Amino acid sequence: MEETLKIIVLVKHVPDAQFDRHLTGEASTVDRAESILSELDEYALEAALQLIEARGGEAAGNKVIALSMGPAGAVNAVKKSLQIGATEGVHLSDEALAGSDAAATSLALAAAIRHLGADAPADLIITGMASTDGETSLVPAQLAERLGLPQVTFAASLELDGGRLTARRDGDTHADTLEADLPAVVSVTDQINDPRYPNFKGIMAAKKKTITTLSLADIGVDPAHVGKSGSWTVVETAEVRPPRTAGTIITDDGDAGIQLVEFLAAQKLL
Amino acid sequence: MAKVLVFIDNPGQALKKPSLELLTIARSLGESVAAVNGELHDDAAAALAAYGAEALYRPSAADLDDFLVGPKAAFLAAAVAAAGADVVLTENSAEGKEIAARLGIRLGAGVITDVVAVDLDGTAHKSVLAGSYTTTAKATTPVSVLTVKPNSVTPEPAVSATAPETVTVQLPADATAAAARVTARNDKPASGRPDLTEARIVIAGGRGVDGNFGPLEELADVLGAAIGASRAATDAGWIGHDAQIGQTGKTVSPQLYISAGISGAIQQKAGMQTAKVIVAVNKDAESPVFEIADFGVVGDLFQVLPQATAEIKKRRG
């Protein structure tokens, strides 16, 4: 019999990219009204659920913990993850975390992951390929560095054979096959699977699942090492880019291709 | 004066344009040195000298490409220490950003991605929230690590070439201990077209191309353009996923972006709205892409694009 899996999936509550998004306040941080579970994290959750289902699911003692760091509203990303199928939820929330950059975020998340592994260390930490707000893709690599674990990022496929992980990573000029032994930090792309939606049964089941709230004190992190004071970068200015406006729109009467070329010539683009 | 270290990963036969751009930016900020992983051919070494690198840092190990990211970050951290560098510049590729990420933790250095310009005092300029804001940001740490987007500067050789000395950097013994191994590498066939994120002109197709990128490719051939696609086109399997432009694909800011048969929903817009000039061709006059197009054609791309291609050929005789 294969060993049970303990997987931590990092989920982020981000502004819905379908609407206009804004920076706010002195530190130019993201306005988190109208936020949802980051679309890219749904692929991470699905990958985790598929891995535990292949080993008999929760009934066989496997579990998927959805961990989110963020203000009060971020608990909604955890709740959604529980509805989709995560076993339990953890919300890392502390006022001192506000304004954390990637380095400070990875410090707090690494401490939370160690805390959650106090009884039994996690076998896998799975994330999306990027957050849809910060878009830097720095945190998974920084977590691997801080935790001293192999990094298997931008995985477009993922297979687990015993304690060995195999993944495909597609680059622009080549595709790599990666291999690492558990435990490992993994990020997955939007090519890896088709995430499931929460169904009625999942929504009802989620109501009975546990969400643990952790503060910085709980995970042993000095508030001075996170948030604005613990960040190694600072945003100095932020300006709204003027919205693009429509230019000349023509309807093709048979010579639109020629008019198009005339436009390009006038713009000195030929 | 700042000391700037440029990371060049596998330069190949000659230095690629993004590497030349990084060297140009480095020289504008102070004294520039390069950390080079992989084989160094004569032409690439000559370019490093022509672009003013004062020293070349080389890893003591030749197997960094057998692992993902971590060992390269360990090499760079050792190179930064050896050089006493204040600023590190890397490419803005997925791997470049991840190397920067881990280097930042190793050095206790702030990392800023997607940079398009760097001021003398180290202030970095970038766009955030899919191009809807422009911001300036700065690392507050002794060393700053910046990943710079292609086409941020015009490459210019130094006034006088240098004769850089080569310094071998010892890797820490545990550099590869906890790293994922690359067990196979399959090179993708070269398209013969410019790289999507570096191209001056991009032509992208969506649902409206209905599986036939032919007219886009013919226009791309005469314009020297790269070919991109919307998620609808890549999901349909008409073109590889690495051609995808948008929120979950690549972000491009070319001089000219020609959108063909793409409605231009917000997910697509996120990847291309910082293009200098946008041209759109779509059958549906209500497509959102027309709200941001500098020149739009409501029409059939299978008529309009071949006519444009023929007209360009005719004008060029």
Image (cartoon, rainbow, N blue to C red):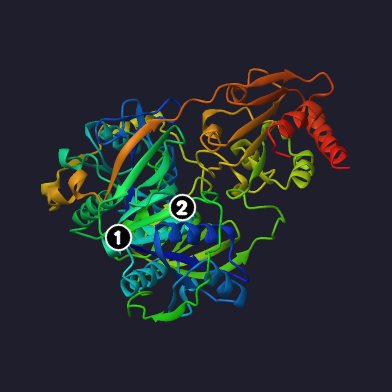
- Label 2 Cα neighbours within 10 Å, binned few <14 / some 14-19 / many ≥20: many
Residue at position x 24%, y 33% in the image: A26
Vertical position of residue B266 compared to residue A210: above or below = above
Vertical position of residue B37 compared to residue A238: above or below = below
- Label 1 Cα neighbours within 10 Å, binned few <14 / some 14-19 / many ≥20: many
The secondary structure type at the circle numbered 2 is strand
CA gap, disc 1 and disc 2: 16 Å
Residue at position x 42%, y 25% in the image: A20
Residue at position x 32%, y 37% in the image: A237
Circle number at residue B148: 2
Chain bearing mark 1: B
Residue at position x 29%, y 65% in the image: B106
Choose between A243 and A153: the one closer to the eye: A243
Asked if marks 1 and 2 fall on the same chain, the answer is yes
Q: Measured from the top left, where is residue B208 in percent x and y?
A: 71, 31
Can residue B115 be seen by looking at this rendering? Answer: no
- The quarter of the picture where the C terminus of chain B appears is top right
Q: What residue type is labelled 2?
A: Val
